[in-house]
Image (tube, rainbow, N blue to C red):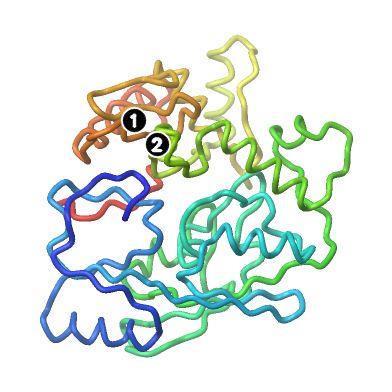
Amino acid sequence: MTTLGIGGPARFFVRAESEEHIAEAFDLVAARGMDVFVLGGGSNLLVADRGFDGLVIQVAISGVERHEETIHAGAGESWDRIVELCVENELAGVECLSGIPGFVGGTPIQNVGAYGQEVSETITSVRCFDRLANQIVELTNADCGFTYRTSIFNSVERERYVVLSVAYRLKKSGVPMIAYKDLRTFFGDREPKLPEVRNAVLKIRRAKSMVIDPDDPNSRSAGSFFKNPIVEQEKFEVIVSQYDGASVPSFPAGDGVKIPAAWLIEQAGFSKGFRLGSVGISANHSLALVNLGGGTASEILALKEKIEAAVKEKFDILLQHEPVFVGFE
């Protein structure tokens, strides 16, 4: 049930297809004192080899409604299906997030983003089961505390809320987002339509094996394994000085500078296709750690730590991983 295809079993499992199922599952957890993990599409997970000794609740609530420029989607809906629906209806705001695997419920949790867009730019509200209050609540965009790849759901309130559905407000006949270099290079001076941008993003992602494809072993990953670090301007200037004025890729990020983690990894000596046992780095994308067949969670951890140590030694930057780790001590 994970895109990495790694990890042991769950002791107990339930597929919750309604809000009532969610509440009942947590009643069971409370009654039996079990550990619990809430699962979505399994696209951003590393599960321990021993598995999870508790109850795994997969949120599989479906349903999509459109009210003019607002889309309401159940947490168990395919995220890419929602992007496709928006593009087909000429609703701009998520076209650059095409091809990202997983369910709708995961999008507010890590503030999913790619190619210059983040879901926090379109999310208006998130309907949740509040485990603390044992009731359903509606959180506004501001309540969610969105920052880069972060929200209250994966930080300060990590164990409190279970996402049930999400509302997104798009822009009818809006102008597509063409911010990242890959897209600007792809289109040149042209002003593409929304479907063209979606198709371009899918093509670029497939070339990097970042679209799940059973026939592509390099796509057996958890997506980007590391976040792009944001450093202070002074630290960035030190890094630039180490390269004798050569171009160091970067993007403005508030008061700091965002440096692509993929560039840092490659500069630290890890090329695409690097292998460690039965796992490795994708041959098409330096940020994706892949299961090359029979890989284990312990191997992924060993590779992760090896990369982190090399980047830390060379740049004095500690990379942060994106996937959620489940079942580890």
The numbered mark, 2 or 1, whose residue comes first in the sequence reads 1
- In the rendered image, the quadrant that contains the N terminus is bottom left
Mark carried by residue 319: 2
* Three-letter amino acid code at the position of disc 1: Glu
- Identify the element where label 1 is drawn: helix
Residue at 33% over, 52% down: 2
89 or 147: nearer the eye?
89
Residue at 31% over, 35% down: 291
**Label 1: few (<14), some or many (≥20) within 10 Å?**
many
Question: x%, y% of residue 43?
Answer: 40, 52
**C-alpha separation, residue under disc 2 versus residue under disc 1:** 6 Å
Q: Is residue 141 left or right of residue 277?
A: right
Residue at 28% over, 51% down: 325
Q: Is residue 154 left or right of residue 181?
A: left
* Three-letter amino acid code at the position of disc 2: Leu
Question: x%, y% of residue 81?
Answer: 59, 61
| Quarter-of-image position of residue 221 | top left
Question: x%, y% of residue 185?
Answer: 76, 30
- Identify the element where label 2 is drawn: loop
Counting the numbered discs, the total is 2
Q: In this figure, which residue is indicated by the disc labeled 1?
A: 308
Label 2 close to label 1 by CB (< 8 Å): yes
Residue at 45% over, 24% down: 283
